[in-house]
């Protein structure tokens, strides 16, 4: 259960990152926000090498780079979704898909999963249907659902790859992850003509978002060393914190059906962790 606790802590940090990252996105663009966040997260993790440095392992560095591709895709699509519609639409979809992908990844790589955990995944999927089936919000729900799906697939790939990390080289694997993610975001920003630095008045906010992102990676990696799959699933609770941020700070609308859907997603996640 230690891994699950670190997963929940990582989910909380994602919510904190959303608070700052979304503020930057609203003042500029999702691409700018994601690029700045990946840059600061990479710097944060490079600094972490002063405290958790071991000779880098080639295999872990490669897996970290693959995870960085997924992280860049997930983060960029997530902020694009938040720019399109409510966090109550995007966050649960991204979370459930990001949970289901590593579960199947684990099955494909011979990680043992109980029937109880499988039942939990089913509950979470029912919650996903309830969240996305509610059209009463009327604000680009379908587009937001597509961005949430793309985000979940990206994050799910990134999470699944890290299930095989040995952590022989300490946080070098996370440095590899974030540096590649930052490089990808530079290419994306250049391709679409988006600025790479946040506008005046949001730079400290962007730094806070990036530090939260780096801390999220550390908490997640530590949890993986104890209980890999429960860590991944527990971190998918981040919609609880993201939606609270959206509701309290950004005045997002949340319907009753979506509340029930989110509750089922959380219950399903709990069942997977407990199984």
Image: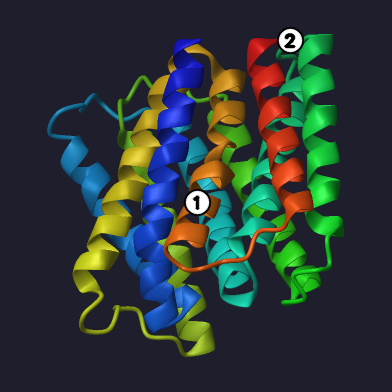
Residue 210, given in percent of the width and then of the height, sits at 31, 56
Residue 214, given in percent of the width and then of the height, sits at 32, 45
Which residue is tagged 1? 244
Q: Is residue 2 above or below residue 214?
A: above
Residue 107, given in percent of the width and then of the height, sits at 78, 21
**Nearer-the-camera pick, 1 or 258:** 258
Which residue is tagged 2? 112
- Observer able to see residue 166: no
- Observer able to see residue 1: yes
Q: Is residue 185 above or below residue 156?
A: below
Q: Residue at x 82, y 20 (%)?
A: 118
Specify few, some or many for label 2: CA neighbours under 10 Å numbering under 14, 14-19, or 20 or more.
few
Q: Is residue 229 above or below residue 149?
A: above
Give the secondary structure at mark 2. loop
Give the secondary structure at mark 1. helix
**Nearer-the-camera pick, 165 or 145:** 145
**Nearer-the-camera pick, 89 or 150:** 89
User: Tag 1 or tag 2, which sits nearer the N-term?
Assistant: 2
Q: Residue at x 21, y 26 (%)?
A: 52
């Amino acid at each position: 259960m230690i891994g699950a606790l670190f997963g929940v802590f990582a989910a909380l940090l994602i919510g904190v990152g959303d608070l700052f990252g979304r503020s930057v996105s609203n003042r500029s663009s999702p691409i700018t926000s994601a690029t700045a966040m990946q840059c600061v997260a990479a710097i944060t993790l490079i600094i972490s090498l002063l405290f958790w440095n071991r000779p880098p392992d080639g295999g872990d560095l490669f897996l970290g780079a693959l995870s960085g591709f997924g992280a860049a895709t997930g983060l960029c699509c997530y902020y694009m979704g938040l720019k399109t519609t409510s966090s109550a639409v995007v966050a649960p979809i991204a979370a459930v898909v990001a949970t289901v992908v590593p579960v199947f990844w684990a099955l494909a790589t011979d990680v043992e999963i109980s029937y109880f955990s499988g039942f939990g995944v089913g509950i979470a999927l029912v919650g996903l249907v309830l969240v996305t089936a509610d059209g009463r919000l009327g604000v680009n729900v379908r587009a937001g659902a597509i961005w949430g799906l793309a985000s979940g697939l990206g994050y799910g790939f990134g999470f699944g790859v890290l299930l095989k990390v040995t952590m022989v080289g300490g946080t070098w694997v996370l440095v590899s992850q974030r540096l590649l993610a930052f490089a990808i975001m530079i290419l994306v920003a250049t391709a679409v003509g988006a600025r790479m630095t946040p506008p005046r008045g949001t730079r400290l906010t962007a730094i806070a978002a990036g530090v939260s992102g780096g801390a999220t990676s550390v908490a997640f990696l530590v949890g993986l060393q104890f209980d890999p799959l429960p860590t991944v699933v527990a971190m998918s609770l981040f919609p609880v914190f993201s939606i609270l941020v959206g509701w309290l700070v950004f005045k997002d609308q949340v319907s009753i059906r979506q509340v029930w859907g989110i509750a089922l997603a959380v219950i399903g996640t709990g069942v997977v962790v407990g199984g």
